Amino acid sequence: KAAAQRYFEKSIDQNGEPETITIDKSGSNLAALEALNAQRDTPIKIRQNKYLNNIIEQDPRAIKRRTRPMLGFKTFRCARIVLGGIELMHMIKKGQMKGTGQTAVEQFYSLAK
């Protein structure tokens, strides 16, 4: 618990206070966050899900698989454009752009025009 609490305190000092933290079913992380929340005026929301971290961690795999054969990017602008396109296609494939009323293929062709 003490090590987890030091980690969270250091992370909050470096990156700012988050609204929500997603953790796995680790008891020490939960105990450390509850101890931190007891000291704060505005508590940090804790999302505890056994597999939610794994979903977040697996997201970059598709990007790594596509960019590795390229041997890197020549400019930051090129990297931003290519990675944005890959992320957009991944979102269409995962069904996160359903509000348009189009199929995934129609969405792709409307963006490619």
Image (cartoon, rainbow, N blue to C red):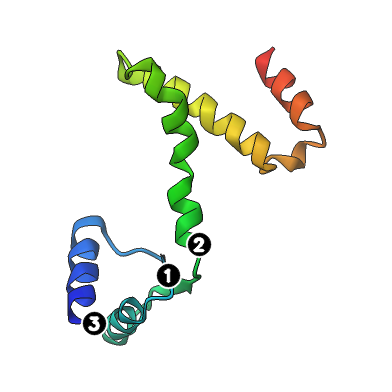
Residue 25 against residue 60 in the figure, above or below: below
Residue assigned mark 2: 52
Query: Where is residue 63 drawn, in percent x and y?
Result: 46, 32
Q: Which residue is drawn at 32% across and 78% down?
A: 33
Q: Which of 71 and 44 is in front in this view?
A: 71
- C-alpha gap between disc 2 and disc 3: 21 Å
- Residue 24: mark: 1
Horizontally, residue 101 falls left or right of residue 59, namely: right
Q: Measure how far apart labels 3 and 1 are at the Cα level.
A: 15 Å
Residue 96's label in the rendered image is none
- Where on the picture, by quarter, is residue 2? bottom left
Label 2 vs 3, first from the N-terminus: 3
Contact flag, marks 2 and 1 (Cβ < 8 Å):
yes
Q: Is mark 2 on a helix, strand or loop?
A: helix
Residues at marks 2 and 1, CA–CA distance in whole angstroms: 7 Å
Q: Residue at x 48, y 44 (%)?
A: 59
Could you tell me the amino acid type at mark 2?
Answer: Leu
**Quadrant location of the N terminus?**
bottom left
Q: Which amino acid does label 1 sit on?
A: Asp
Pointer 1: residues within 10 angstroms few (<14), some, or many (20+)?
some
Which residue is identified by label 3? 1
Residue 113, given in percent of the width and then of the height, sits at 69, 12
Q: Is 103 placed left or right of 95 in the picture? A: right
Q: How crowded is mark 2: few (under 14 residues within 10 Å), some or many (20 or more)?
A: few
The correct choice, above or below, for 19 with respect to 66 in the image is below
Of residues 23 and 9, the one nearer the viewer is: 23
The answer to whether marks 2 and 3 mark residues whose Cβ atoms lie closer than 8 Å is: no
On the image, the x and y values in percent for residue 44 come to 38, 73
